[in-house]
Amino acid sequence: MKFTSASLLLGALAMAACDSKTATLGESATSSATLEAAPAAAGTSGTQATASAEANVAPAPDPRSIPAASSGNAAAILARPQVPILCYHQIRDWTARDSKGAKDYIIPVAQFKAQMQMLADSGYHTISPDQLYAYMTTGAKLPSKPILLTFDDTDLDQFTVARPTLEKHGFKAMYFVMTVSLGRPRYMTKAMVKQLSDEGNVIGSHTWDHHNVKKYQGKDWEIQIEKPTKTLEEITGKKITYFAYPFGLWNPQAFPELKSRGFVAAFSLAEKRDQNDPMFTIRRIIASGYWTPRTLHNNIKQSF
Ligand SMILES: [Zn+2]
């Protein structure tokens, strides 16, 4: 892949983002996430309540320390209620050039802030992917009303707009970085990614330049997965163990390739999970720019 074609691709990505459809209800939940609730902290403000509730949950173990008997038990994993996971891309006000379809991936600043306020007001607690992993594989306890926030594609406004908004509510998130874009205009720098990681957020791998995993052959695994993941490990000083599929697209052939390269789980989008390997097809929904806080709340309840 030449530098120039990657640049062209980035331009297209600004519009195309991760997926062509939004909020497709692939796998409807059988129970609406009545997860084990931590004892509620009485008479505290939102932020304090978050801290108290989370303090009652044991720290998540390193996923790699969880025995294969648990992480490979697909039936048990599939039987547990799904934790809601949201996927965001750009957070900025719409312009006249934004197409109707692109607006699913571009959430106006005020709309984003309103969505986060709704989550806080509704009592949601953001969790880490390690907490999610421990819950999915072993049934480990989670805070009440758990939710995982994820941000794809390295967009600069995730740092400049989302980060302070999340901080206000005491929220943590996951950032899936495509390394080709690091330091480019309108994208985050390595220093920003490092800062997000240092501040308690988790960085995941999202390939080098967003090529479809289903089409990889030969050196593609090295170019798209191995090298970018090593780059992210050098930036953060931490092991990178989570992956998100570009466009949410995957096939079962990708699972052993990802596992052999140190990944413990991978995130897709709204379609149904793989029945044999649910940890490598963890579902997320794209929180559309069209969604009011109420619509988001309804979609969270209906999709997981
Ligand atoms: Zn993406």
Image: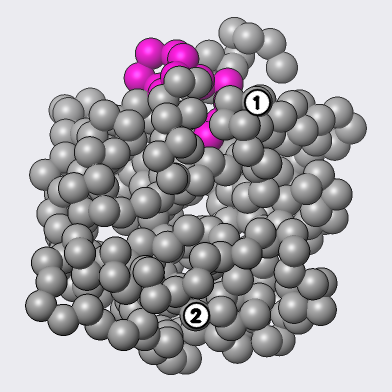
Q: Along the horizontal axis of the image, is 165 left or right of 59?
A: left
Q: Quadrant of residue 217?
A: top right
Q: Along the horizontal axis of the image, is 136 left or right of 141?
A: right
Q: Quadrant of residue 101?
A: top left
Q: Amino acid at mark 1?
A: Glu
Q: Does the segment drawn in magenta span residue 180?
A: yes
| Residue in the picture at 66% in, 59% down | 62
Q: Amino acid at mark 2?
A: Lys
Please provide percent x and percent y for residue 8.
Answer: 52, 16
Label 2: which secondary element: loop
Q: Quadrant of residue 230?
A: top right
Q: Badge 1 local density, few (<14 within 10 Å), some, or many (20+)? A: some
Q: Which mark is residue 141?
A: 2
Considering only vertical position in the picture, is 270 above or below 151?
below
Q: Are marks 1 and 2 in contact (CB under 8 Å)?
A: no
Q: Is residue 246 visible?
A: no
For the N terminus, the image quarter is top right
Outermost residue toward the top in this view: 4
Q: Which mark is residue 130?
A: none
Please provide percent x and percent y for residue 54.
Answer: 37, 69
- Please name the residue that numbered disc 1 is placed on: 234
Q: State the extent of the magenta-drawn residues as a range.
A: 177-189
Q: Badge 2 local density, few (<14 within 10 Å), some, or many (20+)? A: many
Considering only vertical position in the picture, is 77 above or below 159?
below
Please provide percent x and percent y for residue 142.
Answer: 45, 76
Considering only vertical position in the picture, is 231 above or below 36?
above
| Residue in the picture at 56% in, 52% down | 248
Magenta segment, principal secondary structure? loop
| Residue in the picture at 48% in, 28% down | 194
Q: Along the horizontal axis of the image, is 60 left or right of 185?
A: right
| Residue in the picture at 75% in, 41% down | 215
Going from N to C along the chain, the mark reached first, 1 or 2, is 2
